[in-house]
Image (cartoon, grey):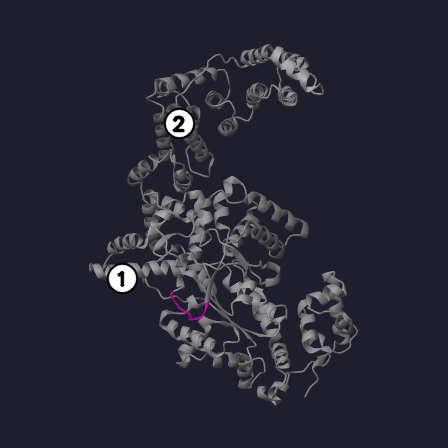
Amino acid sequence: MVKRSLQASLAGIEQAKKAFAYKGWTQDNLAYEVNLKTRQPIWRFFSGRPVERHVFIEICSVLSLNWREIAANPPEEFPELKELGAAEFLDIDALVQQVRSQRFDKIQDQYGTLQLLDVSRPVRIDDIYIDVNILEEIASFQWLEFADLQKFTSKEFDRFGLSEVSQTKIAGITAVEIYSKLRVLGKPGAGKTTFLQHLAIQCNRGKFAANRVPIFVTLRDFADETRVAGEFHLLNYICKEFLTCGISDPSVLETLLLEGRVLLLLDGLDEVLHQQSIGVVNEIRRLSEKYQKNIFVVTCRTAAKAFNLRRFTDVEIASFTSEQIVAFAQKWFTAVTKTNVYQRQEQAVEFIEKLDLPENLQFRRLAVTPLFLHLACWVFHHQNKFPTQKAVFYKQCLDLLLGKWDETKGIERDEVYEGFLLPQKLKLLSQVASATFEQGNYFFEQRIVEQYISNYIGDLPNASTEPEKLELDSEGVLQAIELQHGLLAERVRGIFSFSYLTFQEYLTARKIVASYNLQALKKPLERLVTHLTEPRWREIFLLTVAMLRNADFLVLLMKQEIDALVAQDPYLQKFLTWASQKSLAAPESAAIRAFYLALARTPHLTPYFALVCILDQDIFLDAALDNLVMECKSNFADAHACDDALSYALAIVQDASLHQALQKLKDLLPDPQQSRERFQTWGQISYPAWMERLKAIIAKHQNIQHQWYFSPQQQQVLQQYYDANQLLIDCLNGNCEITDVVRQEIEASLLLPIKELQERE
């Protein structure tokens, strides 16, 4: 029997010391990483003295070294497992350590790195992994009324998530510690496989389930081998893997299982072809019931929950929290990019800041899973910004889910809808998205979505006309879309939605622009414009404008619809005429008209000032003066507030006479340090006249003599008119194809009354 210790060679010590110095650790740090209670083994290792074999191998692993290159006279294999049958191993703990030592390098090599999408080199799992959270309740298992889900607005849709309403989350490793038989569900790209790899590595290092042997099985590989062998036998499959590590005695695995010393990680139950799934599931059941003392963790896409594993607890991987998104981004830019450390950290900070901006809400909606968050980081890294052409990014995401993700992982699927190429899949999904979105439905019953699918299939060449056959086909296609692509998700029993609202919006816009010529496009665009004042259609307009080869027709339709909103109200037309006249002397007339619109609508400009700022950046003085009046009017008892508002206005005033007049008023304000009683006396005696002088000075400067009074209905129309103009400006400023003539005409005629518009024709 060979000794159960190893020692480093002189050359190995030098190599280890360099790796240790690169880490910048102390020996105590290294001892902690190796899960040792004392640093004495670390000292022995660097001194060239014998160290327990599993400790020696773990030290090398933590330092990213090959233990065979570091050890003096490393053994070709560890023969004691051959010399003794496992049953003769009286010390089961010793057997566990022995098997782990024998398989240590292989586990680290196979599961210690990740191959990220579009990244040319593997990344260490330790450098990128973020601890996942687990939901113990599966929403799609629950029964809820359709009306309960219809109450969710578009803003609440993302918070609803997949089974994340008012649920407590627990750490993934905690779930494995609680439940010895666990099935981990999750949507595509949620991190299921990476979670299992993390468990395998942590167990291999003795940092989790230290008294067990980790065994990782990719179920599709097991099923493929079984297809050749003709029988399902998971133990034989694992024994073959043991044999590659020099463990030839089958009783070793049997002993470990009987003693409950195995952490069996079974990945990708959904990736097994349908004809093999029953055999694989039965084998998992048989093994888990025969060897109940062990820990069994199976991963599967949420949509494949029909595979019932008796006595297994189902949980689901939760979407990333804001904190997890930040942590992932920081790790991603450090591990994946090749810039210096400072630039990596700087870009990570910039990514996080920009992801939280309102204009990037659509990216934020998607970046809640490792897959899409990685894609967002990758795009941001190369462009140093989020793409202005959002539609292109969404198309990349859909292409990924509709085929590329499975191709990257080498997964062969049952093709239920055989013959459907990517364009056909997108067309079908676009029809479902458009029909449901137009009806205002973010959630829809299974029978409804199956009817949409049936209608699409029925229009295909050589389609069956038998209702029963169409019904079965539509059921199969819905299951395939949910399971294989994760684009439709069963939220609760019998009720579906798109997995991300962003995809429903993108596919709806795609359906609108799918026509091949302008004549065919007219009707869908005219129908779209009828939703101009509905906030939930805002993103559809922005996407459609960006996706059109020429958006002239759409933006002109929008302009006509916007002008029609106020065309029939004489008082509103009179108001617009007044605003137009006030703007005649200004170089940026549209901006001035927008300012007076906002000024007349509300005393405080904050919610309505955005349009003015987009059109002209030099109108802040008027806003400051208006704000000055309101501050002094509402805070006459607060000398500090009046004084601050006056100081701000004085700081940006250019006109000398106005500056002098305001300064005189400021000098008349009582000293804020005076007693409260004296200031209240000033407020009662002198304030009214002071306030009238202030309003007169500002009115003279702005030449605003007219007071406008709008009914509640008129206020609502003005709000819609203002918001619609804001949307039109956003469309013009977006990444779209609009001719210069059309752009200039729209910008020049913004916010004009009907009479002046007619005169321009």
Residue depicted at x 62% and y 60%: 127
- On the question of residue 420 being in view, the answer is no
User: Where is 664 relative to 505, above or below?
Assistant: above
Q: Comparing marks 2 and 1, which lies closer to the viewer?
A: 2
- Measuring 46% from the left and 39% from the top, which residue is drawn there? 735
Residue 110 coordinates in the image, percent (x, y): 56, 70
Give, as a three-letter code, the residue at label 2: Gln
Displayed quadrant of residue 464:
bottom left
The residue at which mark 2 appears reads as: 716
Could you tell me which residue is drawn at 38 percent across and 58 percent down?
482
- Mark 2 surroundings within 10 Å by alpha-carbon count, few (fewer than 14), some (14 through 19), many (20 or more): few
- Please tell me whether residue 747 is drawn above or below residue 293 in the rendered image: above
Q: Amino acid at mark 1?
A: Leu
In-front residue for pair 251/397? 251
Query: Where is mark 1, residue-wise?
Result: 472
Taking the magenta stretch, the answer to whether it contains residue 443 is no
Give percent across and percent down for residue 315.
47, 62
Q: Quadrant of the N terminus?
A: bottom right
Residue that lies at the very extreme toward the right in this rendered image: 47
**Quarter containing the C terminus:** top left
Describe the element under mark 1 as helix, strand or loop.
Answer: helix
| Badge 1: residue crowd in 10 Å (few <14, some 14–19, many ≥20) | few
Magenta-highlighted residues: 306-312
Principal SS element in the magenta part? loop
Mark 2–mark 1 distance (CA, rounded to whole Å): 49 Å
416 on left or right of 13? left
Q: Is residue 576 visible?
A: yes
Tag 2 and tag 1, C-beta contact below 8 Å:
no
Q: Nearer the viewer, residue 165 or 46?
A: 165
Secondary element under disc 2, as helix, strand or loop, is helix
> In terms of sequence position, does the residue under pointer 2 or pointer 1 come before the other?
1
Up-down relation of residue 758 to residue 741 (above or below): above
